[in-house]
Image (cartoon, grey):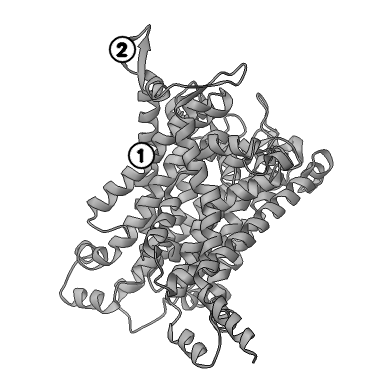
Amino acid sequence: MSTNQSTLSQLIAALGLDTDNEWPHVVRERLVAYGLLGLYVFVIWFPIYFIFITSIKPSGAVLDIPISFLPTQPTVSNYVEIFQNRPFELYTLNSLIVASTTTIICVTLGTVTGYSFSRYDFVGNKALLLSIVGARMIPPIALIVPFFTIMSNPPLIGGLTGSLYDTRIALILTYTFFNLPFAVWIMKNYFDGVPESLDEQARIDGCSRWEGFVKIILPMAKPGIAATAILAFIFSWNEFVFALVLTSSEQAQTLPIAVSLFVADDFVDWAHLAAGGMIAALPGILFGLFFQQYIVSGLTQGAVKE
Amino acid sequence: MSTEKQSLRRTLDRLFVPLTVGPTMLWIAAVIVYPTLQLFWSSVFWTNPINGQREFVGLRNFKRLVFAEEGGAFLGLAPDFVSITWHTVVYVGLSVSISFALGLGIALLLDKDLKGRGWFRTAVIVPWILPYVMSGLMWRWMFQSEYGAINGLLTQSGLLSSKIAFFSDGTLAMMALIIADIWVFTPFIIIILLAGLQNVPEQLYDAAEVDGAGRISRFVNVTYPFLKPSILVALTIRIIFDIRALDLVWVMTQGGPGKSTEVWASWLYRTAQVFNRPGEGAALGVVLLAVTFMIVAVLYNVFGESPY
């Protein structure tokens, strides 16, 4: 009993409810807030929990009635089998190559261009920036017809390489279309927050524009670059529609497609689908748990007005 | 330093802006401007599915999507166009409004000075970062008619005696889609609104409290004016992203049962890729593009703010 009481008082202290000098209504409000937030988190995590335990049930036990909500006989066999029976290592590799290449291109171009947009009032600055805002609003799905046509028969390099259909290059080029304007925009907003006096100091110290940018400004911009990179990676990693339109075999198909392939016309292989889904979800969950502040700051930078 | 080297430095400095902005603009021209022009171009052609020959048809693709005609006789709006537009309005309208209300509530709770709110924030954001395909299939599994968790909870707890076939009924299938959509996108609203709430000066709350302002009055008079730009951004992005979203619909219902959950995005995909009618698919793309820009214009007018 006394241990119970001490755990309770520890909990009360941990939640900051033990303050004598605060009004009772403040304490009550906090309790209500904890209750509501706790309920919300429980409800939204329940499906994730359910698909996770589905992935570690023996594949036959997934269709047991009554449904068990606890992992009876946990096993990793579903995870092993999707790599044995399907080319999941290739899907994973495709996802990694496509997402990281897209990220590198978008972060590099977005950083240098965002910096110039932030610092220099060159001819066409406003118009170009406006076109970048406009480009962000184009619904990607509207462009599936032109992208399918262009990738099947690329205009400039068509004679040299032939079709880009079902290649990772097609996906990378396509994914830069919605990530590059976003990257420029985030980085421009980020550089707007880096004091211009730093540039001036660099010039006074005899740095050229390039040296000042690389040596002084870039190190200051690391958090912005990290936020842009994480978001571009997640967006590319999760992308489904263009992967569906532009790929047809494991030489280019990514994990979202691989997961959707567990759905056949009349039968869904839920246990293996759940395992594949968990693998596809892993980077997102890890980024969310460990780099949450970058995701938040990137989204906020990307959303604010000029 | 030699003079040649110095003049090289000066030249490179003069070229700083062209060299940093130029490549990006060329890239954007190649992967955005060119495909967009191609979209408009494709929308006025009809491709023969047998021999692949293209024929200029003007605005016929648009007309065929929107109007019902038979033998040249005008029969009014096409039933598919009307019903699919209605589904899109229901889907986007309900998803956005419910997730906005929910997101605002959670953001206000997370804005309080609570211990452990960092943990809550992390826990709340995760659904948005997962691949939409995985989220859609996860919800399809949750709502599955025999072995899904929701039917399991309802029947095993004794609330229901028989299981519900969610995806065999148009209304229930739409409801399942909307729930999945709210689950995926509410975190986005929370993030944007929570950032906006940081702009509200703490002293104003205290002053309002001293004046005896109630909870609602405090929100309307203190919070809302500072939060307005964030609300606008959250709503705009949420709406235009929902109109274009195919992922959830495609993996959960494929527009079914029948056509009861077909929305513009799935209609576009089906027309262009499944039925192999690129001309009409492109025409739908043009319409979607126009609608998106119209929605943005209307929203910014309603809120009385300049988008740039």
The quadrant of the image that shows the C terminus of chain A is bottom left
- Residue at left offset 47%, top offset 60%: A38
Q: Quadrant of residue A19?
A: bottom left
Q: CA distance from mark 1 to mark 2?
A: 25 Å
Q: Is residue A55 visible?
A: yes
Tell me if residue B201 comes above or below residue A82 in the rendering: below
* Vertical comparison of B128 with B90: above or below: below
User: Residue B122's x, y, as percent?
Assistant: 53, 64
Q: Chain of mark 2?
A: B
The chain letter under disc 1 is B
Residue occupying the point 42% across, 35% down: B286
Q: Secondary structure at mark 1?
A: helix
State the residue in front, A50 or A166: A166
Q: Which mark is residue B74?
A: 2
> Is B78 placed above or below A162 here?
above
In this figure, which residue is indicated by the disc labeled 1?
B291
Q: Residue furthest right?
A: A84
Give the residue type at disc 2. Answer: Phe
| Disc sitting over residue A84 in the figure | none
Residue A113 appears at what percent x and percent y? Answer: 51, 66
Image coordinates for residue B187, horizontal then vertical, percent: 46, 56
In the depicted structure, whether residue B235 falls above or below residue B219? above
Q: Residue at horizontal 23%, vertical 76%?
A: B204
Outermost front residue: B3
Label 2: state its secondary structure: strand
